[in-house]
Amino acid sequence: MAKVNENYNKLPGSYLFSTIAKKLAAYQEAHPEKNMIKMGIGDVTRPLVTAVVEAMHKAVDEMGTAEGFRGYGPEQGYDFLRNKIVEKDYAGLGIEADEIFVSDGAKSDCGNIGDIFDLDNKVAVCDPVYPVYVDTNAMAGRAGEYIGGHWSNLYYMPCLAENGFMPELPKEKVDIIYLCFPNNPTGVAATREQLKPWIEYAKQNGSVILYDSAYEAFITNPEVPHSIYELEGAKEVAIEFRSFSKTAGFTGTRCAYTVVPKSLVINGTALNALWNRRQCTKFNGVPYIIQRGAEAVYSDEGMKQTRENIKYYLENAKIIRDGLTAAGLTVYGGENAPYIWAKTPDGMGSWEFFDKLLEEANVVTTPGEGFGPSGEGYIRLTAFSTKENTIEAMERIKKVLG
Ligand code: MLT
């Protein structure tokens, strides 16, 4: 008889954002007249910029000609995009094109990267955390048992107001460390000084840092590095994930990339070679048309236009910070990230506050507890709505809390 992967049966409930989508759908069905404002899942609303759209159109036309048609592309991504990424995102950092692996998303890469690691690795995650890191390790059987809101084999690094939402170095030896800065969900960003000890720790303990940098485009503070490779020694210990989703509005078109430096070698094995092997076997590359669109993000026009969108979202973030503060809430993040992390009022539970805002303000947020036990007592809002909806949402929340 076939046997299922029992690890899936250990997972609590459904994926966080599916749960929220279901709750919203149920509420909307019962109250079709309500105009809901979505500030839950971090999905963009600004359209693709002109430079990207034009490049994609051109690529579609090419594909319709005998000379320009392309079938399977290289699993690692086309050279034109890999070279552009190296030139524009890693100038002066010594990253080479064959260390870049273009993919359909940082979410998939963060989840799939576990394929190249043994099950017998101690994994450290921040708490609260982007649920993909935890759930995919649980699916693989690396997380142990789910008991009282915690996975028995994971090492949790609480990120609380008391430590400025910065994880502390593990007090025991861990093998794999997920770090995400600017952070999802808290919206805080780590400076070079704050990241340095992590490189040291990884070197001393032979650990690998999985650095999720999907929100680097939102960095405004010059002390915050855009890439982990700005830190000396990082190429020997870290893998970096980047995405065009939030940077250039590719959540629907899908394009991202992962950097696996060749100098990252564990016990004589280069992780670059393993990831390459994994991708060649399980992945057939991102569509040519999409990669041409991603390449256009780096053109002068593309850069200018995408920067304008980022500015727009950062202005929304400020509206949210100011609005929630005026409503009497304590807020964090939103200055180098599209996420605002807010303390619930009067010690209210995060799901309770989520429901209150859903039903009374008709604003969808994300309950902090969905990101881990230390997220209890917080909610997350995204700055990815339209400006009009962001302003309206703040008015409604002020009224509800006023
Ligand atoms: C989020 O809301 O945390 C993100 O949109 C999820 C994702 O990027 O997969």
Image (cartoon, rainbow, N blue to C red):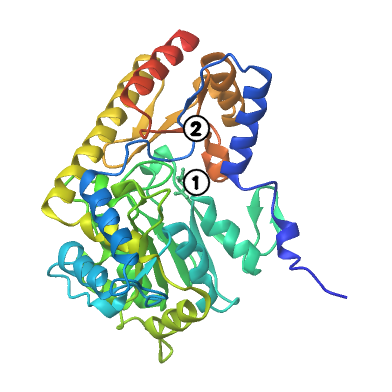
Residue that label 1 marks: 128
Q: Quarter-wise, where is residue 74 in the image?
A: bottom left
Is any part of residue 347 visible from this angle?
yes
Q: Note whether 269 is above or below 188 in the view shown.
A: below
Amino acid type at circle 2 is Tyr
Amino acid type at circle 1 is Pro
* Mark positioned earlier in the residue sequence (1 or 2): 1
Is any part of residue 225 visible from this angle?
no
Residue found at x 29% / y 71%: 68
In this view, the residue farthest toward the right is 1
The x, y position of residue 127, in whole percent, is 50, 49
Q: Is mark 2 within 8 Å of ligand 1?
A: no
Residue 226 or 166: which is nearer the viewer? 226
At mark 1, the secondary structure is loop
Q: Quarter-wise, where is residue 200 in the image?
A: bottom left
Q: Note whether 312 is above or below 389 in the view shown.
A: below
Mark 1–mark 2 Cα distance, whole angstroms, equals 10 Å
Residue found at x 61% / y 42%: 18
Q: Quarter-wise, where is residue 324 in the image?
A: top left
Q: Note whether 106 is above or below 235 in the view shown.
A: above
Q: Is residue 32 left or right of residue 218?
A: right
Contact (Cβ within 8 Å) of mark 1 with mark 2: yes
Q: Residues within 10 Å of mark 1 (few under 14, many from 20)?
A: many
Residue 208 or 167: which is nearer the viewer? 208
Residue that label 2 marks: 378
The x, y position of residue 161, in whole percent, is 41, 37
The x, y position of residue 5, in whole percent, is 74, 68
Quarter of the image that includes the N terminus: bottom right
